[in-house]
Amino acid sequence: MVVFMAISLMIAVSFVVPLGFLVRSTAEDRAIDTGRSDAAAVVPALVSGSTRGQLEAAAGATPSGQAGRLTVITSSGWRIGLEVERSERLDSALSVGLSSIGPVDGGVEVVTAVASGPGELSAIRVFIPDEDLRRGQWTAWAALAAVAVALVGLSVLVADRLARSIVRPAQELAAAAQRLGEGDLATRVEPDGPPELVELSGAFNKLGSQVSSMLDRERELVAELSHRLRTPLTKLRMRVDQVDDDSLVEELHGDIADVTQVVNALIAEARSSLSTAGESCDAALVVAGRVEFWSVLAEDTERPWSFDRGSSPLPVPVSTASLEAVLDVLIENVFAHTDDGVCFTVGFEGDDRKVRIWVGDAGGGVDEAALTRGASGSGSTGLGLDIARSTAQAVGGSLQIAKSRLGGSEVSVVLPRLRIGSFSSQ
Amino acid sequence: MMASVVIVEDDHQIRELAARALAGSGHVVWSEHTGMAGLQSVIDNSPDVVVLDLGLPDVDGSDVLRMIRGVSQVPVIIATARDDDVEIVRLLDAGADEYVVKPYSGAELEARVRAMLRRSAAVGPSNTLRVGGIAIELRSRTAEIDGEALVLNRKEFDLLAYLATRAGEVVSRQELYAEVWRQPYGGADKTIDVHVSWLRRKLGETAAEPRYLHTVRGVGVRLVDPS
């Protein structure tokens, strides 16, 4: 912006200064022309042998004469108008008939030589004061200065707008690149700004799509290869049944189960990455849906429950299926770890940046130490919450455990909030 | 319960091992390695159950399934390496009656065949299970109570159908988890409970005053004819 300001200032100076000089010169020329024409108005009376009275009347009729600035002097010595100091110009006019213009104290004198009779020269001297020479100059200069200032201001404003139109898309692009670098492969930018930035944004979006589809292809390949592993594993399991040694069979079954578990985990991992990449859902809708789903069991087990609805919609960067699984874990924990009849509460709230979903109960509370360790094991609280925690952490969220206002424990999942309108197709 | 089984599997080792496992349990087994040969075997031998692998060298297993459905109502168990919901629903919609996910053992395959035969015996040739006013049409996966259609999701339908094949018996959570959810039972899982609650509500009854669906505390669930 400083550069724009300097450029516009230079442009303003380069045309305002010559224009200023031109204005001054024009004002001087105009004043001198007035003096000349006043002198010319007296010439006819002077050459026609008019009487002194007629000559005084002719001089008095001119603006310079009225202002007492017109003097007529003849070579014979008589004079009309105020007495003036004899200058070289006057002498030249009276002696050799030379008309001239030149500066004197406080202004300029216009001396016009006239042959007023046979062998007689006269001089008409018009004095033009400095104030007449500068008349209108200050007003014109002020107007020029105002125009220059307005021009600089306007150019600064235009420069600011122009800079914004370049800087904002560039900043958005930088932020999107940062998000992509942090692993948010769904991030895209709206092409905006100058053509180069629009082109760069398009290339960035293409890059993001290509990275996503490459990763998807890789995950699909991992899933496909893992699926194929299940056929030889089937063969292995069936072959083991043919072995006579029972203890060996047991060991082999254990080994096969381990390999199967690894294959299943690979498939699940690849599948979950595929299904969650770039997906989003409305947390408010999902929570309401899961509360309705579990409410029938609450009714059957005589558990009072409450649902604390926040504002909606609340878009979050998690697929519907993943968020449903998280909610199921949180609510199921209440049913699994508290007695029938114990009340619970589910709620959600969101601000501009994050969404918090919580499930609290009036039970005895969950062993937080075990949760922190991530204790797992089929059916234990730890395993389910581990899954919920990793779902939240995968998108930059978190899982927190605190004491519920109902007296038991409260598990909260905090997820980043997306901007409205960024729902993906599900 | 002895039965005749056609196995369609392209991997000759799995085919032989599966045939051996089923024959060892007293079943009569025909095994084929291509889809078209399998279809021919179904037409020629009219088996009680078909075990169909999906990855066949000549025709895709799903197409073989459709062709079998064109000529026979024989129960078909699909052997698949994929266990995601989309795939399972697609197979059930295409006319499969049951599925077994790889890697399965000979014992597991035999158990699925037995379950299939038990279900076939329960439904008879009509393919409809009846418990009191409840009628469950297995092929079209629809159910009704006292003539009114029941709107059930996939798990609710599977749960009701499984309980109906064992009508009057208390079915343990472990068994439901293994047979309906196809997962190892964790001991603290409330998924079954919430589905039972939904099913109960859709059947128009409550836990306090059950008619068809009874929860036996600490044991399991039982579907009974209230009359």
Image: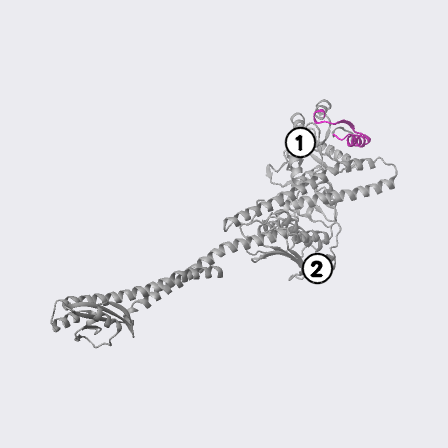
Q: Nearer the viewer, mark 1 or mark 2?
A: 1
Q: Tell me the SS state at disc 1.
A: helix
x, y percent for residue A419: 55, 53
Q: Is residue A337 above or below residue B221?
A: below
Q: Is residue B16 magenta?
A: yes
Q: Provide the secondary structure element on which disc 2 rests.
A: loop
User: Would you name the residue on which mark 2 appears?
Assistant: A365
Q: Which residues are magenta?
A: B10-37
Query: In which quadrant will I find the C terminus of chain B?
Result: top right
Q: Amino acid at mark 2?
A: Gly
Q: Nearer the viewer, residue A9 or A335?
A: A9
The residue that appears at 47% across and 55% down in the rendered structure is A162
Frontmost residue, A146 versus A251: A146
Q: Is residue A70 above or below residue A199?
A: below
- Kindly report the distance in space between the C-alpha atoms of the residues bearing marks 1 and 2: 50 Å
Residue B49 image position (x, y, % from top left): 73, 30
Q: Which mark is residue A215?
A: none
- Mark 1 is surrounded, within 10 Å at the Cα level, by few (under 14), some (14 to 19) or many (20 or more) other residues, namely many
Q: Is residue A85 magenta?
A: no
Q: Is residue B204 visible?
A: no
Q: Residue at x 21, y 77 (%)?
A: A83
Label 2: chain letter: A
Residue type at tag 1? Ser
Q: Which image quadrant: the N terminus of chain B?
A: top right
Q: Which residue is mark 1?
A: B62
Q: Position of residue A42 (x, y in %)?
A: 17, 68
Q: Nearer the viewer, residue A274 or A94?
A: A94
Task: Tell me the subunit letter for badge 1.
Answer: B
